[in-house]
Image: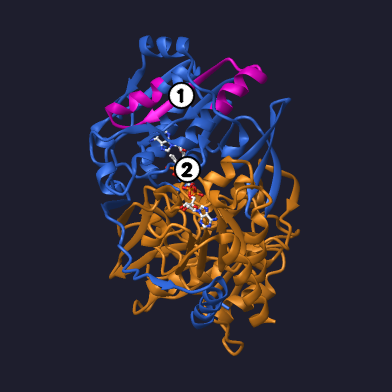
């Protein structure tokens, strides 16, 4: 069984503070991390290998040259191989362009039995990429997976945590899935892992290497600081009972009650 | 190519309210274009849902009917939607950004080779060019997305941003019901079981009012007065990560960067300092109320109403006042 974990490098939003805003954090040279949701994807991929007789786990990233660091983290956590799709033509890639390149790389890797992604990328994709990879590869997509029950006779059974309830579904491998935080606790890189990761060779593919032709993305976007709210605070004062009366008055006035 | 499609999300043939928020955004895109706003839906018995769409103001309804009761599955739904897009050749396809809407819009965009913008908070059209605004980097950046005009724009709108148009019982619209082709209903994913949500429980992301507790509640038992206020207001119970990490409340209640994003009419933060990661999940709420004993707490920079004091005294007072006034 070959398992591929889709890993994205994102800005380190823990560095956001009163003085460091989103625009600053997007700029080149700012701290980058493995997309926090993808740590769960890496963990699940490793557990699939350990518990369900996997052959190897490959971490796959599309991103700028510095994204190799995300792959080194994945290697330090224990993945066997890492592949980096890197091409200046992909700098402005939208989710579909990204998904096309990821799908082509998965094909070039000889396919996989399970492809695991995170819930979403914190820099803003809302979980589209994995669904699009599944659609392009014509594979079943198991999204929002909160629990992995197991694989028997090449059928995988999982529980999806959905707004309308917890839905248990099954599908025959190969599948793509996206996982939620409650599925497992990601392991820390080990000392040995970090040493191994530092020495590992990481395969890099360009668009040409994937035999893909650049296509203009179907959309373009520009980032701007979020609109500042002009919130003028009103302080409600007095005893707790007086504050409570004033607050309930405001809730009625705002038609919230 | 001036029509706008919007997806009507059904559960057992009953319409999910977020569908009308998608309709509201579709109306914005269609305004002044001469194109129609067309409701697209998939289900077993669509009579009621189709009529409801007409009453809410859809210009036309195209329903795909299934021979058996239809449980939502991504693969057949996306396949049928792609068919609907080929039939109507719309300028845009609008979804509500529910989990289903998010995955469907992504799959549809890949099937029809179109651009995708998820969780939009503003939508606009200039001629054939569609522009939307969507938050990125957990709300710390606002991205303005412009779609190429040679393909339909596929987008989902953030919950509770667009106001659902009211129903008008006198309104009608042409309704077309087409049986879904059996082949298009095939799915390789099989639903084994569904444990539906406890209906008593108000979902955090759908709630009109959210009351959240932070580290200041001091323990699992300390959430009782927070929950009592949420219940009295008919709202949902939220929390900061500090309270979740301490094990006082399940993760499902966490609001913020690594939890849920909420946008209620009223957000009441009880003993929450207002860290940027918490703000990321609630700062777009329409009315923010902060209760904190520290008048310098950062949450007050974002709050509309500030109450300085001890939550243990203030919360019971508010709950009592609400019960008195709404009874
Ligand atoms: C990568 C990352 C992701 C994160 N994601 C999230 C997230 O999704 N959601 C989230 O919430 N946090 C998140 N955090 C954590 C966040 O940075 C804060 O640590 C957390 O929000 C603090 O929770 P708090 O406000 O409840 O606690 P504190 O910061 O300890 O604040 C408690 C507040 O209660 C007040 N107080 C104390 N006693 C009383 C009383 N009796 N009456 C009234 N007021 C009182 C204090 O004045 C203080 O302001 C994240 C952090 C990181 C690094
Ligand atoms: N550039 C990328 N390289 C590798 N994986 C990605 C990339 N972008 C997104 N993914 C995967 O797809 C998931 C959802 O991302 P998104 O659609 O951007 O929210 C992420 O959690 C990753 O697992």
Q: In the picture provided, is A33 more to the left or to the right than B257?
A: left
- In depth, the one of A183 and A219 nearer the eye is A183
Residue visible at 48% across and 33% down?
A38
Quadrant position of ligand 2: top left
User: What chain is tagged by disc 1?
Assistant: A
In magenta, the rendered stretch is A43-72
Chain identity for the colour blue used in the image: A
Name the secondary structure under disc 2. Answer: loop
- Residue B286: x and y in percent read 45, 69
- Residue B209: x and y in percent read 56, 67
* Figure check: B105 above or below A118: below
Residue occupying the far front of the picture: A239
User: What chain is tagged by disc 2?
Assistant: A
Q: Say which mark, if any, is on residue A217.
A: none
Q: Say which mark, if any, is on residue A120.
A: 2
Name the secondary structure under disc 1. Answer: strand
* Figure check: B9 above or below A200: below
Q: Are discs 2 and 1 located on one and the same chain?
A: yes
Would you name the residue on which mark 1 appears? A59
Mark 2 Cα-neighbour bin, 10 Å: few <14, some 14–19, many ≥20: many
Q: Is residue B145 visible?
A: no
- Residue A126: x and y in percent read 46, 48
The colour scheme is by chain
Chain identity for the colour orange used in the image: B
In which quadrant will I find the C terminus of chain B? bottom right
Q: Is residue A146 visible?
A: yes
């Amino acid at each position: 069984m070959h398992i591929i974990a889709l890993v994205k490098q994102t800005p380190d939003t823990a560095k956001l503070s009163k003085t460091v805003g989103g625009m600053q954090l997007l700029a080149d040279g700012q701290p980058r991390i493995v997309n926090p949701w993808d740590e769960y994807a890496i963990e699940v991929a490793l557990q699939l290998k350990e518990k369900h007789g996997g052959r190897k786990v490959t971490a796959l990233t599309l991103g700028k040259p510095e994204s190799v660091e995300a792959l080194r983290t994945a290697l330090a956590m224990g993945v066997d191989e890492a592949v980096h799709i890197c091409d200046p033509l992909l700098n402005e890639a939208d989710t579909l362009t990204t998904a096309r390149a990821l799908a082509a790389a998965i094909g070039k890797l000889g396919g996989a039995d399970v492809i695991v992604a995170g819930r979403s990328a914190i820099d803003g994709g809302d979980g589209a990429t994995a669904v699009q990879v599944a659609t392009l590869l014509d594979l079943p997509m198991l999204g929002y997976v909160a629990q992995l029950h197991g694989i028997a006779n090449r059928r995988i059974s999982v529980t999806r945590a959905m707004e309308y309830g917890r839905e248990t579904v099954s599908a025959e491998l190969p599948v793509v899935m996206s996982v939620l935080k409650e599925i497992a606790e990601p392991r820390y890189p080990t000392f040995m892992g970090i040493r191994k990761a530092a020495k590992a060779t990481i395969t890099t593919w360009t668009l040409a290497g994937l035999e893909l032709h650049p296509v203009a993305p179907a959309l373009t976007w520009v980032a701007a600081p979020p609109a500042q709210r002009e919130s003028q605070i009103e302080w409600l004062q007095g005893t707790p009972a007086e504050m409570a009366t004033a607050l309930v008055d405001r809730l009625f006035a705002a038609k919230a009650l | 190519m001036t029509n706008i499609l919007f997806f009507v999300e059904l559960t057992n043939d009953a319409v999910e309210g977020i569908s009308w928020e998608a309709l509201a955004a579709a109306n914005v895109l269609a305004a002044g274009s001469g194109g129609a706003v067309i409701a697209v839906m998939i289900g077993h018995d669509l009579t009621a849902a189709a009529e409801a769409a007409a009453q809410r103001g859809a210009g036309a309804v195209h329903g795909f009917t299934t021979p058996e009761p239809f449980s939502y599955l991504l693969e057949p739904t996306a396949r049928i939607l792609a068919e609907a897009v080929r039939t109507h050749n719309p300028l845009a396809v609008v979804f509500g950004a529910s989990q289903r809407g998010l995955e469907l819009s992504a799959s549809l965009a890949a099937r029809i080779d179109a651009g995708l913008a998820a969780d939009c908070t503003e939508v606009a059209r200039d001629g054939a060019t569609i522009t939307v605004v969507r938050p990125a980097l957990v709300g710390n950046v606002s991205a303005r997305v412009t779609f190429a005009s040679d393909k339909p724009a596929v987008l989902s709108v953030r919950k509770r941003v667009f106001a659902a148009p009211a129903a008008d019982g006198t309104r009608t619209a042409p309704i077309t019901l087409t049986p879904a082709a059996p082949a298009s209903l095939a799915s390789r994913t099989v639903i084994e079981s569904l444990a539906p949500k406890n209906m008593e429980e108000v979902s955090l992301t759908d709630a009109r009012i959210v009351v959240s507790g932070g580290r200041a509640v001091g323990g699992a038992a300390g959430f009782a007065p927070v929950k009592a206020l949420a219940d009295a207001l008919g709202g949902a119970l939220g929390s900061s990560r500090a309270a979740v990490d301490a094990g006082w409340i399940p993760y499902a209640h966490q609001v913020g960067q690594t939890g849920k994003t909420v946008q209620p009419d009223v957000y009441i933060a009880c003993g929450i300092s207002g860290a940027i990661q918490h703000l990321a999940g609630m700062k777009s709420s329409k009315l923010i109320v902060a209760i904190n004993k520290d008048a310098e707490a950062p949450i007050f920079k974002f709050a509309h109403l500030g109450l300085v004091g001890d939550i243990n005294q203030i919360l019971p007072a508010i709950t009592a006042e609400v019960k008195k006034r709404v009874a």
